[in-house]
Structure formats: structure tokens, C-alpha cells
Image (spheres, rainbow, N blue to C red):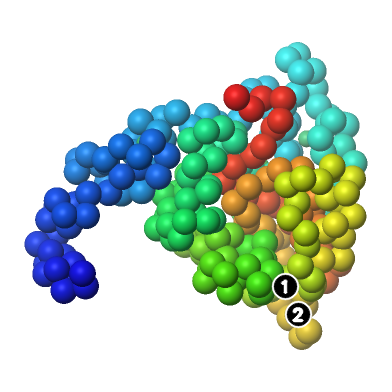
Amino acid sequence: MPYLRDVLRDFGDGAMDLVFAPVCVSCSNPIPTTEKDRIVCRLCWVKCRTLPHPRCERCWGPVPPGQDPRPKCRTCGDWPQAVRAIRSAFLMGNEVKAIVHALKYRGWEGSAEPMAQRMAEMAFPQDVEDEARMVVPVPTSKARLRERGYNQAALLASAFARRTDRTTVPDLLARTRSTRTQTALHPDERRANVARAFSVPDGRAPELQGEHVILVDDVWTTGATALACAQTLLDAGARVVSVATFARVIPELER
Ligand SMILES: [Zn+2]
Ligand SMILES: [Zn+2]
């Protein structure tokens, strides 16, 4: 109904909502017209949990109470020094999963804005805030790009960069081969699966020299994908890489 839509748009969002009442992608209830977000209802946003404390300053992984994660956090102790800080807006749970799923599989491109807004509100360490100017999304495969028409990480990266006054460079990382779906794999298999799966396109490495890059993805699961991307950026000349994701899977804390 393109014409009705155009006519109603002239009357503003209120008129649009009367006919195309938006429902929350998480709970499927109608979203009250008083709420600005037209994708996720306020109640579902409230149910999204942030990562629990105490957390490691570097990776935000869980740390046993009263224990100093330095110098060797259980999660990030073995990572390269040049991987600086990992931040995720929310712990994976029912509502967070529904929001991610909507962005990824249901074509709700509009979800990227409210998701990136939450990511932009996360506090990075001061040196990251001061240094990191460049935002790069985790690339998707050409096949998935054809299937969905967009890379969900690139949508998040561009909205996140705009909201944090940074520059997004969407094509600085490429997937050199399709990785199998990661979901059913053990962590070791995942690492092998993503190794050498990414590259910096020919001639683009000079843009990375000396940069502190923020890598953006929708979900951090084992970190294998993001860490493989980070290593690729570092090998090509980036000085430091930090990571921002919307959701973090911490299996022992999932509901
Ligand atoms: Zn809801
Ligand atoms: Zn850590």
C-alpha cells in the first residue's frame, strides 16, 4: 500500500501507527504511541541485562568476586597485547536474542539504530575514547549479503560511528572464504574455522597504519571471529584494536 503509506506519512508518525501499528520484535505486543522506539518496547528494553559485575576491565568477562583479574584474566589473559578492550551492551538473554534475531533474519534494518544507541552509551577506557577514530564492521560472506541484502554488523557500525563521532570504514575487512555456521562447533573448531577467513583488500593497508580501530559485530560468542578479525587488522598495520558488540554470550549466565 505505498500510496496510503505516503499519505499517512504526511500526517506524521501518529497516523502511520494507527494503520501500521508497530509491534515489539521481542514480545509481539503493540508498542504504545508514546514510545519513541518503534522496534522494541520499553518493557523489553528494561528486561535486557547488562554484563554482571565484577567484570574484567579489559574484556568485561566475569571475574570471581574479590579476585583481581590482572595480570591474567581467565578470558583475555592469552590475547595479544594490542587487543585493548572488549565491550558489549547486553548479556545474551531472551529479549536480547529476539532483538538480534530481528536485525539478522527478519530484515528489521531499523533495529540497528536503537541497538547502536545502547552500544554508544557503553564506557570504553579513556585511552580508547581518546585514540580510536576508525570503526570497522566484521564482514559477512558474499552469499549471506546476497541473501539478506545487508550486513547487520555494517549497519550497527555505521550507526555506532555516527553516534560516537567516529568514522566507519565498511570495506576495510573482507571475508576471504565462507565459514561454516559456527553455532554447532566447539570453541577449538570455531577458532580453526575462522583462522585466515579474513583479509584486508589490496591497497587498503595504508589506511590502517598506526590506527586504533574499533571492530563492531552484533554478537560476541566465543570471540573467535572478532579475534581473527583483530589479528588481521593488526597484521595489516593497525596499532590497537578494540571491540564493541551489542550482545555477549556467557553460557554459564544464560537464562
Ligand atoms: Zn516488548
Ligand atoms: Zn579479561
- For the point 81% across and 46% down, the residue is 185
Q: Secondary structure at mark 2?
A: loop
- Residue 249 or 166: which is nearer the viewer? 249
Tell me: residue 62, above or below residue 28.
Answer: above
Q: Which residue is mark 2?
A: 201
Q: In the rendered view, would you say 72 is above or below 169?
A: above
Image position, residue 101 (x, y; %): 53, 48
Q: Name the amino acid, label 1.
A: Ala
Q: Secondary structure at mark 1?
A: strand
Q: Residue at x 72, y 72 (%)?
A: 174
**Residue 232: % across, % down:** 82, 65
Residue 211 spot, x, y in % from top left:
72, 65
Residue picked out by circle 1: 174
Work out whether residue 211 can be spotted: yes
- The foreground one among 20 and 135 is 20
Quadrant of the image where one finds ligand 2: top right
Extreme residue toward the top, this view:
66
Dot 1: few (<14), some (14–19), or many (≥20) neighbours within 10 Å? Answer: many
Indicate the quadrant where residue 110 lies. Answer: bottom left
Residue 142 point in image, percent of width and height: 66, 74
In the image, taking residue 189 as reference, residue 206 lies left or right, namely left
Q: Quadrant of the C terminus?
A: top right
| Separation of marks 2 and 1 at Cα, in angstroms | 7 Å
- Is the CB of mark 1 within 8 Å of ligand 2? no
Q: Is residue 111 left or right of residue 49?
A: left
Q: Are marks 2 and 1 in contact (CB under 8 Å)?
A: yes
Q: Nearer the viewer, residue 50 or 144?
A: 144
